């Protein structure tokens, strides 16, 4: 399966997500769609439009080990901090090292939130079925962190939704996402971009326009 671009992928993903609207009494109140910037937002916009649900951006930052930032010892989001205490203890990460990593990532988190949302308050996810959308899953670290943050913010049910993902990636219900909705799980998966005809980088203005249109 090849998607023309992120909008095409979003429209097709929206069809796969339509049943979610029937699980709530009022999609405008009980559902929320969150797009991971940058590329996940135009995909999420199509899903939100199709379901009649509000759209917001979800910005998270992984807290990587000081000597290997690919290994997450935690994650931060708006008003949320999750730590893997067992990994931190086993790895011997000091309080000072953890603080340095978190300080750096909080600066980047604040910068991205300012860039994409400005002074608007985040939409409330507590008690809602929340669909976390990206343009695809590579390692899965970002969307997993986003789902963990959303769950910590009180979401009733957390759904990860992407157009394409590796066949061996699965959520951990009750920890990150309760369910994964994906359109394609190709065996020969090397990169998300190989499944798009147009995988041009999404500009900041495009993200702001999609969010401002809601």
Image: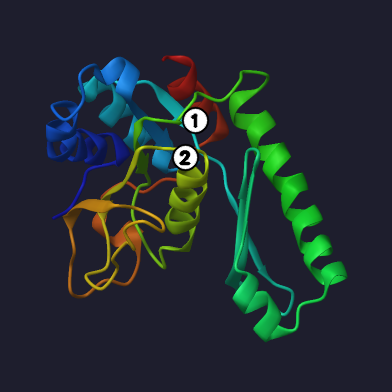
**Residue appearing at x 21%, y 47% in the figure:** 3
- Relative to the observer, which residue lies in front, 40 or 127? 127
Question: Is disc 1 in contact with disc 2, using a CB cutoff of under 8 Å?
Answer: yes
Neighbour tally class for label 2: few under 14, some 14-19, many 20 plus, Cα within 10 Å: some
Q: Measured from the top left, where is residue 24 in percent x and y?
A: 21, 25
Q: How is the image coloured?
A: rainbow
Q: Quadrant of the N terminus?
A: bottom left
Who is closer to the viewer here, 156 or 213?
A: 156
The span from disc 1 to disc 2 (Cα, nearest Å) is 7 Å
Q: Residue at point 39% right, 30% down?
A: 127
Asked whether, in this view, residue 83 is left or right of residue 132, the answer is right
Residue 69 shows up from this direction: no
> Could you say whether the residue bearing mark 2 is in a helix, strand or loop?
loop
At x 83% / y 62%, what residue is drawn?
100
Numbered tag placed on residue 41 in the rendering: none
Query: What is the x, y in percent for residue 148?
Result: 48, 52
The numbered mark, 1 or 2, whose residue comes first in the sequence reads 2
Residue 147 x, y percent position in the rendering: 43, 50
Residue 123, above or below 149: above
What residue is disc 1 on?
207
Front one among 161 and 124:
124
Q: Please name which of the two marks, 1 or 2, marks the residue nearer to the observer.
A: 1
The part of the image, by quadrant, that contains residue 188 is: bottom left
Left or right: 158 in relation to 88:
left
The tally of labels here is 2
Q: Which corner quadrant holds the C terminus?
A: top left
Q: Is residue 56 visible?
A: yes
Task: Establish if 45 lies above or below 100.
Answer: above
Quarter of the image where one finds residue 34 = top left
Q: Which residue is mark 2?
A: 202
């Amino acid at each position: 399966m090849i998607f023309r671009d992120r909008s095409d992928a979003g429209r097709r993903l929206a069809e796969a997500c339509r049943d979610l609207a029937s699980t709530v009494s009022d999609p405008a109140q009980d559902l929320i769609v969150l797009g991971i910037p940058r590329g996940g937002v135009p995909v999420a916009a199509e899903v939100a439009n199709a379901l009649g649900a509000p759209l917001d951006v979800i910005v998270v930052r992984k807290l990587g080990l000081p000597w290997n930032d690919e290994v997450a010892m935690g994650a931060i989001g708006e008003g949320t901090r999750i730590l893997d205490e067992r990994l931190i203890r086993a790895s011997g990460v000091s309080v000072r090292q953890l603080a340095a990593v978190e300080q750096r990532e909080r600066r980047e988190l604040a910068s991205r939130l300012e860039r994409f949302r400005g002074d608007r308050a985040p939409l409330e996810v507590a008690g809602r079925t929340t669909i976390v959308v990206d343009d695809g899953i590579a390692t899965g670290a970002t969307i997993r962190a986003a789902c963990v943050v959303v769950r910590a913010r009180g979401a009733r049910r957390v759904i990860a939704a992407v157009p394409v993902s590796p066949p061996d990636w699965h959520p951990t219900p009750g920890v990150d996402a309760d369910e994964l909705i994906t359109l394609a799980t190709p065996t020969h998966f090397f990169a998300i971009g190989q499944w798009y005809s147009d995988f041009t980088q999404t500009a900041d203005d495009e993200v702001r326009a999609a969010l401002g249109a809601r």
